[in-house]
Image: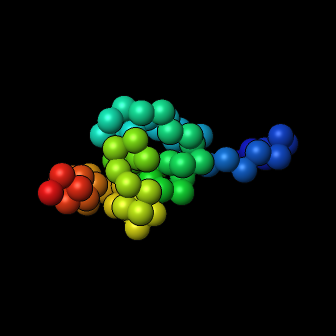
Amino acid sequence: MSMDITGSHETEDSAMADTRCRNCDAFITPQFARVFGNNHNEVYGCFECMTATEVKKGRANHPEEAERAREELRQ
């Protein structure tokens, strides 16, 4: 076992966060992916392709939920 002498506590998932929305390919920050994405920091909707309310409700972290939210907006 080795010790991390740099003091970094980043996990592999947070270091590998997607920087693009998987729906519209818009840029997202790693922090956005960590907060609004799923457990693997994958984001299926962002403020470019969903309303802020839908993103905040957690609908951006699952592909089917994100698609359902976008369909509701079109109606």
Q: Is residue 64 visible?
A: no
Residue drawn 23% across the image and 56% down it: 73
Determine which quarter of the picture holds residue 2.
Answer: top right
- Locate the C terminus by quadrant: bottom left
Residue 13 in the image, given as x and y percentages of width and height: 53, 47
- Looking at this view, is 30 or 48 the one in front? 48
Q: Position of residue 14 (x, y in %)?
A: 58, 46
In the rendered structure, the answer to whether residue 12 lies left or right of residue 36 reads: right
Residue 7 seen in the current view? yes
Q: Is residue 3 above or below residue 57?
A: above
Q: Is residue 6 left or right of residue 61?
A: right
In the image, taking residue 56 as reference, residue 5 lies left or right, namely right
Q: Give the residue displayed 20% in from the left and 60% down from the top.
A: 72
Q: Residue at x 72, y 50 (%)?
A: 9
Residue that extends furthest to the left in the rendered view of this protein: 75
Residue displayed at 41% across by 46% down: 46
Q: Quadrant of residue 25?
A: top left
Q: Residue furthest front?
A: 75
Q: Position of residue 16 (x, y in %)?
A: 53, 38
The answer to whether 27 is drawn above or below residue 3 in the figure is above
Q: Position of residue 28 (x, y in %)?
A: 50, 39
